[in-house]
Image: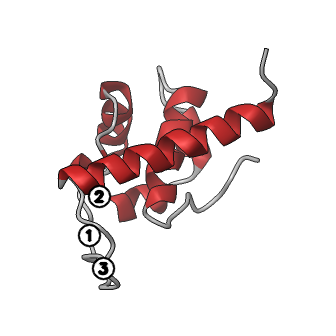
Amino acid sequence: MFNADQLRQFADILETAARGFREISGAVPAVSGEPESPQTPLRECYLSVRSQKACRKLGVETVEQLAAKTERDIIDLKNCGVAVLNELRAALRVRGKAFTESMI
């Protein structure tokens, strides 16, 4: 079917398209050169229910708190696997952030 590189490229394309749609629709303000507010609520990330639950289990309410976690923190949670981890990685990447420690 598809190799890992093709899937990553497809995910990046979808992520870029979703970001553009949110900016156009006004759901997320376009980047204007001004620094982001110090604490960005996770609700602005439009996460799936499973990813939201994972964040709640970790006591995470902001993007900055999520970035302070490790990928292992996510994977170790019950019912959280690669799909949740990838979604949270993408949410951080869109905002120019990443987990403190990568498993890859």
In-image side of 65 versus 46 (left or right)? right
Residue 32 lies left or right of residue 18; in this view the side is left
In this picture, residue 34 sits left or right of residue 27: right
Numbered disc 1: secondary structure: loop
**In the rendered image, which quarter contains the N terminus?**
top right
Q: Which of marks 1 and 2 is nearer the N terminus?
A: 1
Observer-nearest of 73 and 13: 13
**Horizontal relation, residue 72 to residue 68: left or right:** right
Which residue sits furthest bottom? 34
Determine contact: label 1, label 2, CB under 8 Å. Answer: yes
- The residue at the point 68 percent across, 39 percent down is 8
Where is residue 63, by image quadrant?
Answer: bottom left
> Disc 1 vs disc 3: which is toward the camera?
3
Residue 74's spot in the image, x, y percent? Answer: 52, 39
- N-terminal label among 2 and 3: 3
**Three-letter residue code for mark 1:** Gln
C-alpha gap between disc 2 and disc 3: 21 Å
Q: Is residue 20 above or below residue 14?
A: below
Dot 3: element: loop
Q: Can residue 81 be seen in this view?
A: no
Give x and y (percent) for residue 31: 33, 72
What residue is disc 3 on? Answer: 32
* Residue picked out by circle 1: 39
Query: x, y percentage for residue 23?
Result: 28, 57
Identify residue for label 2: 62
Instruction: Kindly tell me whether residue 3 is visible in this rendering.
Output: yes
The amino acid marked with disc number 3 is Ser
